[in-house]
Amino acid sequence: MNDISPQAQARYEAELSILAGVLGQENYTTQLLGPQDDMPLPTLLVALGTDEESRERSLGITIMPLGDNSLAATELVQFYSRMPFPVPAGRDTELRAATAAVNAAMALGHFAVLGEELFYRYVLAVPNNTTIDGAMLLELVALLEFHQEHFADYLEGVIDDEIALKTLPELIALG
């Protein structure tokens, strides 16, 4: 996956630049990053502002390379957000159970745990001969922003022992 051709990298960067322009028109702050050690693909970072505890939240957008001829007509665009709080040692088993409950209630994307990191991810399939519609992109980013912030609060509550795992489904249902 790290070995994309210079042509593919340039195309991904061009597509992400178009998305940055659309988001910038709606006052989202964006930054296009080239491949780096911790992010091997061109990535568009979108600032989502701060949560109720003044922690910065962001969304990374990447185009996922699938290799030659994997999907001839489809491109996968990944939206990825690390939660701004760690997963304490010893809490990952309970948190994984909580993510299953939360994921069952969400319309878009999913949460997962990797090491000490909780993240939210959504993958959009789009035709590879067009760019994402600007109006749809703005609505999608707003929905993803809501999902990752609202539902992450439940997960952080489980981590902090403020929400019991057995009551989580009922709390989610109550909204």
Image (cartoon, rainbow, N blue to C red):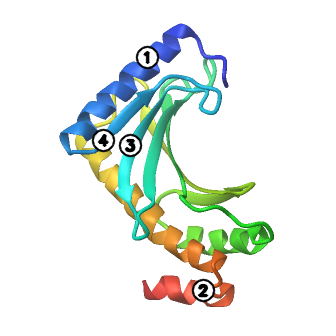
Q: Which of marks 4 and 1 is nearer the N terminus?
A: 1
First along the sequence among labels 3 and 2? 3
- Residue at x 75%, y 72% (from the top left corner): 91
Q: Distance between the residues labelled 3 and 4?
A: 6 Å
Q: Where is residue 134 in the image (x, y as percent from the top left)?
A: 25, 39
Looking at the figure, which quarter contains the C terminus?
A: bottom left
Question: On the image, numbered disc 1 is attached to which residue?
Answer: 11
Looking at the image, which is closer to me, 125 or 109? 109
What separation in Å lies between label 3 and label 1 (alpha carbons)? 19 Å
Q: Which of marks 4 and 1 is in front?
A: 4
- Name the residue beneath numbered marker 4: 29
Q: Is mark 3 on a helix, strand or loop?
A: strand
Q: Residue furthest left?
A: 25
**Amino acid beneath label 2:** Ile
Q: Badge 2 local density, few (<14 within 10 Å), some, or many (20+)? A: some
SS at circle 4: loop
Q: How far apart are marks 4 and 1 (CA)?
A: 22 Å
Q: Position of residue 38 (x, y in %)?
A: 63, 33
Looking at the image, do the residues carrying marks 3 and 4 touch, with CB atoms under 8 Å apart?
Answer: yes
Name above or below for residue 2 compared with residue 126: above
